[in-house]
């Protein structure tokens, strides 16, 4: 039976009464989304400046500003050179090219991810080899990665994803990459502002990639950023991103290029959004903590993370315990009927028909990714969601375990 709005509450919160309860009941049909943009006033100022200067075309002062501001934000012990691009996928593609991946080259890749992680490998004729996850973070398992190196000693690079904004076991993975002399490409598309042992995600590999897609923790509506340690590599990526045009009076091309530049207008959105990044991260964590507390007595587990990391909690997820008969897809359907968006965990890449012929390596036992996918779901994590709206989600999830 669905728990009454009037009796469900987080420990320490006052019970809803009067106007608050009526408002909650009246809003029961309002759409609750997984994760949508949260806009502020500063974005408009940068956009207005672009219009006033008639600098609407790709590149420009907002792109330069966003690159410099992201570089300052992620800076740790090393300086990073940043390149604003049309999408996170474009940034991944250029990272793959910078790593020298070509026809027939193998890349050991996180298996639990979105296909945009893998597609750029194939763009360059590379062959993805999928590596299973571990339960501590749902990210690439260093033990499985070591086995992948044993089985594929000719691998040329590792593509690592920080799933749902949760940092992976980077030091162990980095050590394996160094031992085998391969580049580490860090897909930090979902994990901007997350930290691993005090270092920001996106700066833990040889190449880092950030996404500013509309559903990410901050957005430019679309867009991405490439991070490299060497300015010459950043400049080479910019050359490719601007159609590989040579320095000549006419259009001269010796290489294949791409139209991957970021618009000066959308970069302005990103500059305004960046001012609120830490605020967004804190509000994402508040959403996660409410779920964590509300489900503490249920046979479910929230997406895990390492004690020495700080996720950005981009999406709050859960898995139903193995000894429980509740079907995550049934929860998703019920939430959908209530106009609430929820989704399954990313379907592992080795289970995707398009990658059916690619190798998949586990640590030796059953596939962790298949298990997490079968038992998991992503919950609404929009930071504009009110506590009352999140209570609707919680009530429906809890009703399956009553």
Image (cartoon, rainbow, N blue to C red):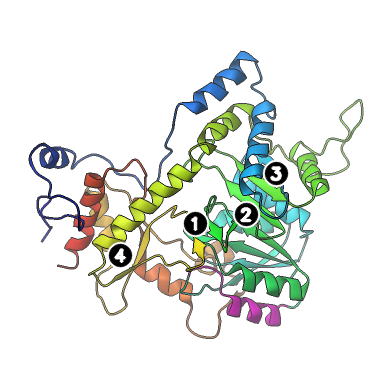
Real-space CA distance between mark 4 and mark 2, rounded to the nearest whole angstrom:
32 Å
Task: Give whichever of 177, 213 is nearer the camera.
Answer: 177
Badge 3, how many Cα within 10 Å: few under 14, some, many 20+? many
Query: Left or right of 278: which side holds 235?
Result: right
Q: Earlier in the sequence, mark 4 or mark 2?
A: 2
Disc 4 + disc 2, Cβ < 8 Å = no
Query: Left or right of 295: which side holds 239?
Result: right
Q: Which residue is mark 2?
A: 202
Direction top: furthest residue? 52
Disc 2 + disc 3, Cβ < 8 Å = no
Disc 4 + disc 1, Cβ < 8 Å = no
Q: Secondary structure at mark 1?
A: helix
Q: Earlier in the sequence, mark 1 or mark 2?
A: 1
Viewer-side label of 4, 1: 1
Write the residue at 69% across / 51% down: 93
Q: Quadrant of the N terminus?
A: bottom left
Q: Which residue is mark 1?
A: 165
Please provide percent x and percent y for residue 377: 36, 61
Real-space CA distance between mark 2 and mark 3, rounded to the nearest whole angstrom:
11 Å
- Residue 82 is tagged as 3
Q: Is residue 131 above or below residue 123?
A: below
In magenta stretch: residue 138:
yes
Please provide percent x and percent y for residue 16: 12, 46
Q: Which residue is mark 4?
A: 328
Disc 1 + disc 2, Cβ < 8 Å = no
Magenta range: 137-152
Q: Secondary structure at mark 4?
A: helix
Direction left: furthest residue? 18
Task: Give whichever of 129, 385 is nearer the camera.
Answer: 385
Q: Quadrant of the C terminus?
A: bottom left
- The answer to whether residue 105 is seen in the rendering is yes
């Amino acid at each position: 039976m669905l728990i009454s709005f009037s009796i469900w509450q987080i420990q320490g919160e006052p019970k809803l009464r009067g106007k608050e309860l009526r408002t909650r009941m009246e809003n029961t049909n309002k759409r609750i989304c997984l994760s949508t943009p949260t806009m502020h006033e500063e974005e408009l100022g940068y956009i207005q400046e672009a219009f006033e200067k008639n600098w609407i075309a790709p590149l420009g002062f907002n792109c330069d500003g966003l690159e410099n501001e992201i570089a300052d934000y992620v800076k740790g012990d090393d300086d990073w050179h940043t390149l604003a691009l049309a999408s996170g996928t474009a940034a991944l593609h250029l990272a793959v090219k910078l790593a020298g991946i070509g026809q027939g080259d193998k890349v050991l890749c996180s298996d639990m991810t979105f296909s945009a992680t893998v597609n750029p490998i194939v763009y360059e004729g590379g062959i993805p080899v999928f590596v299973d996850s571990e339960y501590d973070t749902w990210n690439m398992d260093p033990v499985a990665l070591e086995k992948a190196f044993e089985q594929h000693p000719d691998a040329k690079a590792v593509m690592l994803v920080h799933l749902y904004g949760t940092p992976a076991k980077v030091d162990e993975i980095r050590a394996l990459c160094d031992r085998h002399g391969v580049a580490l490409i860090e897909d930090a598309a979902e994990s901007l502002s997350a930290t691993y042992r005090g270092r920001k995600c996106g700066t833990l590999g040889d190449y880092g990639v950030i996404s500013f897609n509309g559903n990410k923790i901050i957005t430019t509506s679309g867009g991405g950023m490439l991070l490299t340690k060497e300015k010459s590599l950043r400049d080479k990526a910019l050359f490719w991103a601007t159609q590989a045009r040579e320095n000549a009076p006419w259009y001269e091309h010796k290489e294949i290029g791409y139209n991957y530049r970021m618009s000066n207008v959308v970069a302005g959105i990103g500059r305004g959004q960046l001012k609120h990044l830490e605020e967004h991260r804190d509000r994402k964590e508040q959403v996660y903590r409410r779920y964590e507390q509300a489900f503490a007595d249920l046979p479910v587990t929230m997406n895990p993370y390492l004690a020495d990391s700080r996720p950005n909690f981009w999406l709050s997820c859960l898995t139903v315990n193995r000894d429980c008969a509740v079907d995550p897809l049934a929860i998703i359907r019920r939430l959908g009927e209530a106009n609430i968006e929820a989704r399954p965990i990313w379907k592992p890449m080795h289970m995707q028909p398009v990658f059916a012929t690619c190798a998949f390596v586990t640590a030796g036992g059953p596939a962790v990714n298949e298990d997490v996918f079968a038992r998991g779901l992503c919950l609404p994590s929009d930071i504009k969601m009110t506590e009352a709206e999140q209570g609707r989600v919680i009530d429906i999830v809890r009703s399956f375990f009553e």
